[in-house]
Amino acid sequence: MFWALIYVAILDFLAFQLVGITQHALSSRKNLNVIILKFSMFIVISIAHIIDSYLFQIEPTLKVTTLSFYLINEVVSILGRFVKMGLPLPNLLIKIFQQEL
């Protein structure tokens, strides 16, 4: 699941770049902010792993929950960026995004 999150985080960053290109809004400051947020996400996952492994010495429940949260969050972010670019998505997904926004 960790590798899946890495791939999806990279895809989200690429989708962020595509939105910047299509909207003529590329900025090195925005890129740096996104990179810092992605890096911070992996720090939180590392902390969850440390808590599971060394403090509780149980199954990696907190780590898996944290990974699942960020994985879902990244997929939603990618789809949201595609909506910003005007990519047609199924009506159900569009309704979900309209409720969230």
Image (spheres, rainbow, N blue to C red):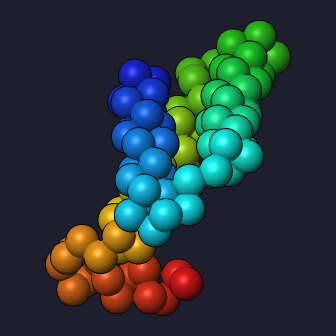
Q: Residue furthest right?
A: 55
Frontmost residue, 48 versus 39: 39
Residue at 43%, 34% (x, y): give it. 10
Apparent side of residue 69 relative to residue 48 in the rendered image (left or right) = left
Image quadrant where residue 21 sits: bottom left
Does residue 43 sit above or below 35 in this rendering? above
Image quadrant where residue 98 sits: bottom left
Total marks in image: 0
- The picture places residue 101, in percent across and down from the top left corner, at 55, 84
Frontmost residue, 87 versus 46: 87
Residue at 49%, 58% (x, y): give it. 20
- The picture places residue 63, in percent across and down from the top left corner, at 60, 29
For residue 13, say whether it is visible. yes
Residue at 38%, 64% (x, y): give it. 22
Apparent side of residue 46 relative to residue 71 in the rendered image (left or right) = right
Frontmost residue, 61 versus 78: 78
Residue at 29%, 76% (x, y): give it. 86
- The picture places residue 16, in percent across and down from the top left corner, at 48, 52
- The picture places residue 75, in percent across and down from the top left corner, at 39, 53
Apparent side of residue 92 relative to residue 73 in the rendered image (left or right) = left
Please identify the quadrant where the N terminus is shown. Answer: top left
Image quadrant where residue 25 sits: bottom right
Apparent side of residue 8 relative to residue 27 in the rendered image (left or right) = left
For residue 1, say whether it is visible. no
Q: Residue furthest front?
A: 24
Frontmost residue, 17 versus 62: 17
Does residue 54 sit above or below 3 in this rendering? above
